Image (tube, helix red, strand yellow):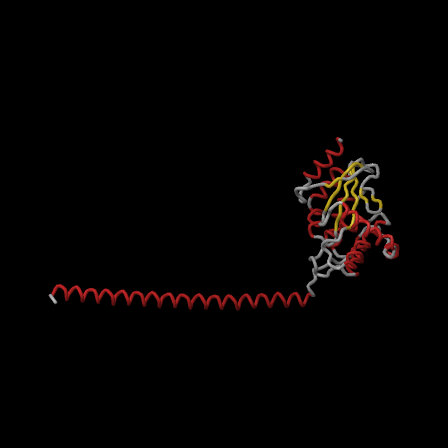
Amino acid sequence: MSPVESDEEDLTRKQRREQARSERKALEEAEAAGAQRRKRLQQLGIVVTVVVVAIVIVLVATGGKSKTIAPQSAEASKVASTVVSEIGGIPQSTNTLGSPTAPVTLVYYGDLECPICKDFTLGALPQIIQKWVRTGKVRIEYRSLETATREPETFKTQQTAALAAGQQAKMWDYIELFYHEQGEESSGYVTESYLQGLAKQVPGLNLSQWTVARNNSAYANQILADGQAASGAGFTGTPSFQIGKTGGALTKLEYSSLSESTSFDEAIEKQLKA
């Protein structure tokens, strides 16, 4: 072998050794980085576990229930004041808000535990009431449709409590308070204490008469009839709406937003012009 060939072979061996060392170094660095990532993930897993355990402890300690507002508290007075300013002075009759001679009727199917109904109550509804109901152009009928409430008996009890307030022309005060103070869905917050607490917040509601009225079997029949009417109209969710001339045929009202009243305004204006 010539000297040149020997040098080339030595150089090749050296290059292979350097390449092998580089590969081993890269592998070692990759293994070290992987170990570091695993360590960080383990630490993160411990943190997540601690947080989850803490949440579970809080839920167990609170019974998973949302805070309710005490009837005589300052917070309760503030909510009641908001409701009074919104619907105070507007005629009520059983489940209806607005003048009986209003030319347009808006039917509102709701579940008192429905969080989307609450969005409507705090969003578009005050605008509709101010612009159309208070001016005598629209009357709103509230009807019951079970969607969010898990227990049928709870649904019947809460909706009956609202209907019983309607015997004293206070149903809308009751349902507005319910939506404003609505608890977390499926948390079991609707108890007898909660329902009575709402009744105590309704200005001018005779609690003794309300308690007696809750035993009226006619309300259970009305709730059943509301559900059947909703089914006949093809409604499966709440809130759902129908609109039409008062005393005439009703059609489904399609809305684009529950936070503002534009789609409701357009439907009402169309009925008034018809």
Q: Position of residue 78 (x, y in %)?
A: 73, 51
Where's the C terminus, which quadrant? Answer: top right
In the image shown, does 18 or 158 lie closer to the viewer? 18
Residue, x 72% and y 44% (percent of image)? Answer: 125
In the image shown, does 28 or 125 lie closer to the viewer? 28
Residue, x 77% and y 41% (percent of image)? Answer: 106
Rendered position, 41 above or below 79: below
Determine which quarter of the picture holds residue 150. Answer: bottom right
In the image shown, does 135 or 118 lie closer to the viewer? 118
In the image shown, does 199 or 125 lie closer to the viewer? 125
Residue, x 79% and y 53% (percent of image)? Answer: 159
Q: Position of residue 266 (x, y in %)?
A: 70, 36
> In this image, 174 relative to 61: left or right?
right
Where's the N terminus, which quadrant? Answer: bottom left
Q: Position of residue 105 (x, y in %)?
A: 79, 39
Check the image and name the residue furthest to the front. Answer: 1
Number of disc labels: 0
Rendered position, 100 above or below 23: above
Rendered position, 243 above or below 154: above
Q: Position of residue 115 (x, y in %)?
A: 69, 52
Check the image and name the residue furthest to the left. Answer: 2
